[in-house]
Amino acid sequence: MFQMPSTAPEGIRLTVIPNRSHAAVGVMGVTTLLQLVPSPKKEESAQALKHADVFMQRHAIIRAEVQRVLKGSKGKNVEPYARYLAEALNGEYGEAYSTPPITLWLAGDAQSVSGEIVPDTGICNVIVNPSSPVVAIDGETQVTAWHELSTNPEKYGITFEQIQSARVPFEIYFDITVDDARQIFHDRNVKGVAVSKNLSMSMDQRDLATQIARRLVDTVKVEQDGKYRPLRELVEFRERQLTRSTGAIVTLSALRDLVLSSIHGRKGIGMSATDTAGEALPGGVSSNQMKEELLPILTVLLDRLYPHLTGETVVSSPAVLAGLGVAVHRSVSWSTEGPALTRQDLIDLVDSVQWARDVRFWDGIAGNVSKTGALSFGGGTKIHGSRVADALLDPDSANGRKIRGWN
């Protein structure tokens, strides 16, 4: 017969490195995470809780003390997050993907904590007491997404074996009060500053519009003071608006507006704040074909417009660039917005316009007269972008004649 130990260390073992007296970091398998932290979606289901065991019911009560509900934007993000994780597991992103460490709170006692496994490293084993709930203070959307994948891996095009081999970083807090846990939740969700949409988009290399905009600034060269300079040296990448101190002549977000409406036509004017990575492309055209057609056209267009970008003109306005994109869209093979334009037609339309930032040409089209009598670009890209497009494409209309100084 086996000799049974007097105090068997039952529970889940985590190998961690302490970074504070009551906190440690480590890496665990996803299947271990799913055993430690129940599905938040199930814990918010009255029907599921009704038939749950006492451990899950207790866990749900403690979770409610330190977490918000999944309803709303948090819940809506679970499925996209699950798709992202599945695509990463399938190797679609290579090494260009990341998930933040999940922040856990051990709301009870550990069964045991070992001494150092390797001398002078602090590495040790923590055995989590089976009766001690573990709650995700931060990273709960990721936890819920992993539960979704494990419940229905086929839906997301992966296998359970892929989930079984996946590992996630985590940090865990123990021997702290529920008030401490609430404070950590607060600090994680309030103290951080959200990245601006413009900077975020400029970093998204899966977004086709961002890819093309970046290719443009990397390939187009402009003549300045008798020398050719890469356009990238004159582009503002981080801010949505130009400031005199930077020396930039256009923002990357405005160039992305140009690309979006060049791809999608008028529909693209309303997509400036949208992450279009993974979006269906119009007409079943591949992204490579779009790049091959758009890059030469947009290169010629920017070269033509460059002298106007450097002065007091309307060209750098997102609304104007979006409107220009609608005209460019008429020249691509997948456009369903007619009539079609040749490249020369496009150049003729652009060359006939008065681009000076003057209310005589652009009031009510690219912007409106301010209280000081100057032209203000307030009012939104969507409204003004459509007006710019109409005026560009119809030279004989009232606004078409106005922006050309023919009135």
Image: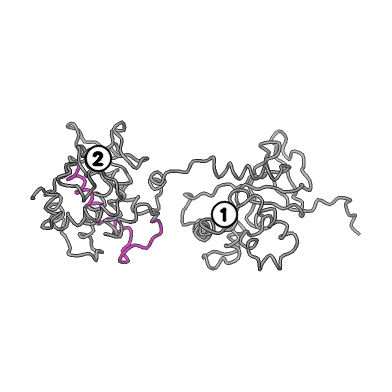
Classed neighbour count for the residue bearing mark 2: other residues with Cα under 10 Å, few (<14), some (14–19), many (≥20)? few
Q: Which mark is residue 35?
A: none
Q: Secondary structure at mark 1?
A: helix
The residue at 23%/53% (across/down) is 323
Which image quarter is the N terminus in? bottom right
Question: Which of the two residues, 386 or 345, is positioned nearer the viewer here?
Answer: 386
Magenta stretch, residue numbers:
276-305
Q: In the image, which disc is placed on residue 371? A: 2
Q: Position of residue 178 (x, y in %)?
A: 69, 45
Q: Nearer the viewer, residue 365 or 197?
A: 365
Name the mark on residue 142: 1
Where does residue 360 sit, x and y in percent of width and height? 14, 45
Asked where in the image residue 37 lies, by quadrant, the reply is bottom right
The relative height of residue 407 versus residue 123 in the rendered view (above or below) is below
Badge 1: few (under 14), some or many (20 or more) residues near its Cα, within 10 Å? many
Q: Check disc 1 and give the amino acid type.
A: Gln
**Mark 1 or 2, closer to the camera:** 2
**Distance from Cα at disc 1 to Cα at disc 2:** 49 Å
